[in-house]
C-alpha cells in the first residue's frame, strides 16, 4: 500500500484541531461493526447503538472543526443535508400517501440523519492524520477490514452450518444462509451480497499491481486482499447472481490493468506473470459461465416483448403470476427476469416524466403508481435503485444525492492516498450498481449516504494542528 502525503497550496488550506487517536480508532472500529452487520437480519439494536455512538463522537469532531465545512469541497456534504430537508418538505407538501410516508420518515430517515455526523466526523478524523504514514496505514487497514467484514461473516455462517451438519447438530437459525428474504425472516437478498461484498473486492483488485511490484510476498499484509479476491466471486457463484459475476469480471480487468501499469508492459517478474495468467483464466471462466446462462442467451428474444409495454401487460404482475405465458422467437417461454427488467425500466421512465416530484416512498413508489393507473396490478420495485429513488423523491431528490456522489469522485483526485483509491472504487461501484439492482431501500440508501459523507470530508483541504 502506497502512502502519499497530501499537500495543497497554503491559501487553500484550513487549520483544524486533530482528533485524538483513541476517538479516531473508536470511530473506525465502529464503522467495522456497522458495515459488517448491516445486511444481517435482526441486528437493529447493534446498528442503532453503533449509529448513536458514531453520531455523538462525529458531532464532537465536527463541532471542533466546523470551519472545515466552509469551503467548496464541502458541497457534497451540504447536498446530503439539503436532501434531508427536501425529504421533509416532500413529506408535508408533496407526498401522496402521508401516513405511510410519515412511518418511513420516522423509521428510516432518522437513521440516515444519525449516519451523517458519524460519517463526516470519521472522515475528518482520518484526514487529521494524513501526515503520519503509520497512523494513515493503521486507519486504512481498519476501514478495509470493515468493507471485508460482510465477506467474512458470509463464510463464517457457511462453514458453521457445514460443521453442524457433519456433527449432526441442528444449525442455529442465525447461522443459516438463505436468499429467500421475502419469505424467510432470516434470509438475505442477493442484492445485499453484491452491494456490501464487492467494494472490498474492487480495492483488492486495484492493489494487485502494487503487491506484485514488491520483491517478496508478505502474507501478514496481504491476507485481506486474498479473502476479498477469492471470497467475493465464490459468493456470487454460490448465490447465482449475474450482476455480481459481471462486476467480478470488471474487477479482474481492473486487476490486470493494475499489474500491466506497474510492470510497464515488461513481465520480468515471475510472480506478476503467474498472477496475470490466473486472472485471465478466472476472467475466462466467469465469461463462459455467464454466456452459458440461458438468461443471457435469450436476452434479445425476450426484449422484443419487453419493449412493447402497451401491447403486452404481463409486466404489471410479479413473477409467477403472469398469464398467459409469452413464447419468444427461440420457442422458449420468455424469462421473467429479462422481461421484467426491461419492461419495468421503460415504464419507470414514463412515470418519472409523469411524476417529476415523486410519490413519496423510498421503496414502493413504482408499485403504488402502477396500481393507480392499473388497478389490480402487482408490482413493487422497478429493479433499478436510482429509478425507484427518483420515483420516490422526485428528480430534485435524485439530483441531490447523485450530484453529491459525483462531486466526491471529482474531489478524490486531490485526496491523500490510499483514501483516493477507496473513494474511486468503493463509491464509484456503489453509484453504478444502483442502476441495475433493486437497492432503493433502507440499508442500501443509508450505507450509500454514510459512505458518501465519510469520503466527502476525507477530501477536504486542511492544515493539521496538534490537539
Image: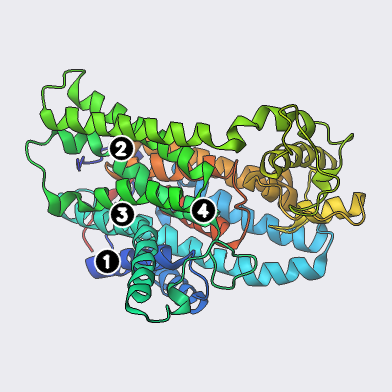
Which numbered disc flags the more N-terminal residue, 1 or 4?
1
Residue 75 visible within the image: no
Q: Nearer the viewer, mark 3 or mark 1?
A: 3
Residue 379 visible within the image: yes
Q: Residue furthest top?
A: 265
Which numbered disc flags the more N-terminal residue, 2 or 3?
3
Q: Residue at x 77, y 51 (%)?
A: 366
**Residue 378, percent across and down?**
82, 56
Residue under numbered circle 1: 25
Quadrant position of the C terminus in the picture: bottom left
Q: Residues within 10 Å of mark 4 (few under 14, many from 20)?
A: many
Mark pair 2, 1: CA separation: 25 Å
Residue under numbered circle 2: 206
In the displayed structure, does residue 438 sit left or right of residue 8? right
Which numbered disc flags the more N-terminal residue, 4 or 2?
2
Q: Residue at x 35, y 46 (%)?
A: 201
Amino acid at each position: 500500500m502506497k502512502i502519499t502525503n497530501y499537500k495543497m497550496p497554503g491559501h487553500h488550506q484550513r487549520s483544524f484541531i486533530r482528533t485524538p487517536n483513541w476517538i479516531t480508532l473508536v470511530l473506525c472500529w465502529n464503522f467495522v461493526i456497522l458495515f459488517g452487520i448491516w445486511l444481517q437480519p435482526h441486528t437493529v439494536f447493534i446498528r442503532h447503538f453503533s449509529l448513536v455512538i458514531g453520531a455523538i463522537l462525529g458531532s464532537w469532531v465536527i463541532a471542533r472543526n466546523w470551519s472545515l465545512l466552509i469551503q467548496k469541497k464541502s458541497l457534497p456534504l451540504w447536498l446530503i443535508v439539503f436532501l434531508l430537508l427536501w425529504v421533509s418538505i416532500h413529506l408535508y407538501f408533496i407526498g401522496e400517501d402521508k401516513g405511510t410516508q410519515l412511518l418511513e420518515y420516522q423509521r428510516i430517515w432518522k437513521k440516515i440523519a444519525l449516519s451523517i455526523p458519524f460519517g463526516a466526523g470519521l472522515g475528518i478524523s482520518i484526514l487529521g492524520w494524513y501526515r503520519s504514514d503509520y497512523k494513515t496505514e493503521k486507519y486504512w487497514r481498519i476501514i478495509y477490514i470493515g468493507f471485508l467484514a460482510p465477506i467474512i461473516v458470509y463464510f463464517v455462517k457457511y462453514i458453521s452450518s457445514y460443521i453442524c451438519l457433519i456433527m449432526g447438530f441442528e444449525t442455529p437459525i442465525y447461522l443459516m444462509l438463505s436468499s429467500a428474504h421475502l419469505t424467510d425472516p432470516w434470509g438475505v437478498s442477493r442484492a445485499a451480497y453484491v452491494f456490501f461484498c464487492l467494494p472490498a473486492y474492487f480495492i483488492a483488485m486495484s492493489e494487485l499491481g502494487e503487491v506484485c511490484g514488491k520483491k517478496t510476498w508478505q502474507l501478514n499484509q496481504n491476507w485481506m486482499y486474498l479473502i476479498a479476491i477469492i471470497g467475493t466471486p465464490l459468493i456470487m457463484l454460490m448465490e447465482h447472481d449475474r450482476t455480481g459475476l459481471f462486476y467480478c469480471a470488471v474487477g479482474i480487468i481492473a486487476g490486470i490493468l493494475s499489474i500491466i501499469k506497474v510492470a510497464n508492459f515488461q513481465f520480468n517478474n515471475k510472480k506478476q506473470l503467474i498472477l496475470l495468467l490466473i486472472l485471465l483464466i478466472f476472467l475466462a471462466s466467469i465469461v463462459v459461465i455467464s454466456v452459458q446462462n440461458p438468461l443471457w442467451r435469450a436476452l434479445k428474444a425476450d426484449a422484443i416483448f419487453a419493449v412493447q409495454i402497451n401491447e403486452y401487460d404481463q409486466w404489471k404482475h410479479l413473477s409467477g403470476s403472469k398469464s398467459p405465458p409469452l413464447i419468444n422467437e427461440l420457442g422458449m417461454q420468455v424469462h421473467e427476469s429479462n422481461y421484467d427488467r426491461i419492461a419495468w425500466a421503460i415504464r419507470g421512465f414514463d412515470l418519472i416524466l409523469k411524476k417529476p416530484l415523486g410519490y413519496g416512498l423510498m421503496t414502493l413508489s413504482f408499485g403504488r403508481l402502477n396500481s393507480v393507473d392499473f388497478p389490480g396490478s402487482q408490482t413493487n420495485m422497478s429493479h433499478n435503485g436510482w429509478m425507484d429513488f427518483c420515483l420516490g423523491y422526485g428528480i430534485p431528490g435524485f439530483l441531490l444525492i447523485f450530484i453529491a456522489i459525483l462531486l466526491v469522485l471529482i474531489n478524490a483526485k486531490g485526496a491523500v492516498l490510499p483514501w483516493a483509491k477507496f473513494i474511486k472504487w468503493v463509491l464509484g461501484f456503489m453509484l453504478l450498481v444502483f442502476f441495475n439492482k433493486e437497492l432503493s431501500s433502507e440499508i442500501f440508501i443509508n450505507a450509500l449516504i454514510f459512505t458518501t459523507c465519510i469520503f466527502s470530508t476525507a477530501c477536504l483541504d486542511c492544515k493539521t494542528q496538534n490537539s
